[in-house]
């Protein structure tokens, strides 16, 4: 069992009484409201605080099968279930090390594992990771995933595989799922497919290209192969990793440090590097990966202070529910689909993006940005942020009214919170 940089304790971390309200209320929102018992998934938003009506905004199966409003489910409330799940699995591991409710936490983690497995199997295409499943029928999913969804799926499962709480049966399931992802990528990520993960209809998907992409995206494909090798020790996955790793790392290290990076770009780049920093079999390359992680953490800390100030000054409502996609205040076409001399289609399908309620989005974005940037800083064990970083994160993380909040941004806040608590307690 690999040693984590946030190593392992079952004792509770001392925390001032006022600070205990943050994890307790946020955990309630995560486990009792955003989590769906039927699908074992955490959804992106709520349309009501009433339990029986909280998922009424999600699309109907008839809409999903017709790719409405778009083939990825953007703007529907079920587009990022795998981003949520990957974060939540690590949250559960970290929480189980520092909180007293260990069995409750691990039981929830195993439910999340069930939901992730369903997203990789419900469609009958082993290795394809659907974004989410409709709770209306427990099986409908959109056909366009993304490299981001695959990234958090792989990372969360890999983290759980190596934690001290996983049983052999769970490790067997994870080993099967991760090797299926690698096999799927080997099969479809080819030049003739635009090096794309493809949609479930076999055509290229949007935001699914895996090679010759931006610096924050290039290391994802080798990360998938490395995770499969790490849990299976099958040599073919190591060979696939070695085929891509050096070039992908070079592209990653070409990132422009003067650019203002988006929080999702930084955190997902850091996640892919964090897996490799532990699992890469070559010490020399591992050292370069760790150096790169420190650079990413530094950029994330700079961005964190900008976003922390925005969240500190936020005066909007933390309790704004969202609307069904067909009541969106505006809809836009993805720029990839806009042509002057051709149909506005991407491989035959229309990508119409509905925009959620503006007040909902503003609160969600404040939380997600601060949480993701904290994660990108704290995932790097060699990087030491400013002395007031942790306190500034905790102060703004306490601002939302989690008991009445409605967005999946709580996943990002809790991810940062428990990484910080584990670091404070010396794990």
Image (cartoon, rainbow, N blue to C red):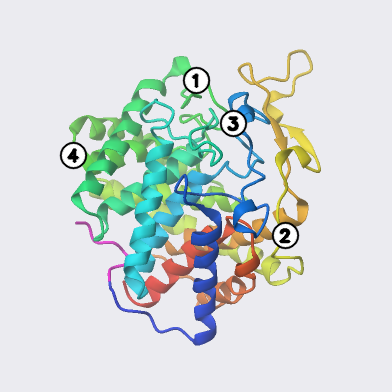
In space, the residues marked 3 and 2 are separated at their CA atoms by 26 Å
Distance of mark 2 from mark 4, alpha carbons? 48 Å
Count of marks overlaid on the render: 4
Rendered-image quadrant of the C terminus: bottom left
Residue beneath the point at 58% across and 42% down: 78
- Position of 348 relative to 278 (above/below): above
Q: Mark 4 vs mark 3: which is more N-terminal?
A: 3
Residue 8, by quadrant, is bottom left
**Mark 2 packing: few (<14 Cα in 10 Å), some, or many (20+)?**
many
Report, in whole angstroms, how far the alpha carbon at label 1 lies from the one at label 3.
29 Å
- Work out whether residue 27 can be spotted: yes
Callout in the foreground (2, 4): 2
Which residue is label 4 attached to?
233
Residue holding disc 3:
61
The kind of secondary structure element at disc 4 is loop
**Residue 352 in the figure: left or right of residue 184:** right
Give coordinates of residue 151: x percent, y percent.
Answer: 43, 42
Label 3 close to label 2 by CB (< 8 Å): no
Work out whether residue 282 can be spotted.
no
Disc with the residue nearer the chain's start (1 vs 3):
3
Which residue is drawn at the image coordinates 66% and 29% (left, top)? 68
Q: Is residue 378 above or below residue 171?
A: below
């Amino acid at each position: 069992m690999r040693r984590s940089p946030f190593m392992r304790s079952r004792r509770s971390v001392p925390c001032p009484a006022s600070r205990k309200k943050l994890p307790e209320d946020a955990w309630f929102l995560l486990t009792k409201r955003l989590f769906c018992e039927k699908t074992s998934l955490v959804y992106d938003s709520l349309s009501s605080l009433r339990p029986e009506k909280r998922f009424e905004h999600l699309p109907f199966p008839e809409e999903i099968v017709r790719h409405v409003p778009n083939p990825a489910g953007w703007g529907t409330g079920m587009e990022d279930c795998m981003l949520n799940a990957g974060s939540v699995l690590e949250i559960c591991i970290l929480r189980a090390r520092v909180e007293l409710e260990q069995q409750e936490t691990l039981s929830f983690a195993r439910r999340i594992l069930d939901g992730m497995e369903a997203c990789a199997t419900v469609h009958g295409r082993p290795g394809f990771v659907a974004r989410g499943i409709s709770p209306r029928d427990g099986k409908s999913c959109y056909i366009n995933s993304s490299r981001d969804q695959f990234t958090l799926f792989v990372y969360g499962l890999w983290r759980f595989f190596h934690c001290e709480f996983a049983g052999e049966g769970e490790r067997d399931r994870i080993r099967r799922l991760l090797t299926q992802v690698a096999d799927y990528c080997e099969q479809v990520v080819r030049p003739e497919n635009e090096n794309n993960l493809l949609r479930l209809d076999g055509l290229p998907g949007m935001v699914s290209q895996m090679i010759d992409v931006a610096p924050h995206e290039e290391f994802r494909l080798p990360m998938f192969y490395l995770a499969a090798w790490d849990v299976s020790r099958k040599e073919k996955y190591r060979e696939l990793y070695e085929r891509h790793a050096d070039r992908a790392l070079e592209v990653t290290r070409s990132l422009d440090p003067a650019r203002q990076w988006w929080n999702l770009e930084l955190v997902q780049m850091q996640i892919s590097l964090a897996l490799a920093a532990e699992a890469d079999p070559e010490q020399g390359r591992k050292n370069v990966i760790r150096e790169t992680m420190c650079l990413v953490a530094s950029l994330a800390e700079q961005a964190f202070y900008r976003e922390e100030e925005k969240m500190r000054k936020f005066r909007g409502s933390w309790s704004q529910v969202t609307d069904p996609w067909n009541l969106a205040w505006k809809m836009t076409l993805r720029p990839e689909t806009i042509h002057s001399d051709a149909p506005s289609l991407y491989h035959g399908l229309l990508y119409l993006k509905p925009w959620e309620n503006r007040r909902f989005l503003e609160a969600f974005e404040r939380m997600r940005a601060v949480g993701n940037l904290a994660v990108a800083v704290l995932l790097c064990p060699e990087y030491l942020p400013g002395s007031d970083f942790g306190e500034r994160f905790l102060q703004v993380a306490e601002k939302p009214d989690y008991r009445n909040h409605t967005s999946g941004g709580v996943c990002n806040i809790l991810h940062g919170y428990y990484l910080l608590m584990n670091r404070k307690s010396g794990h």
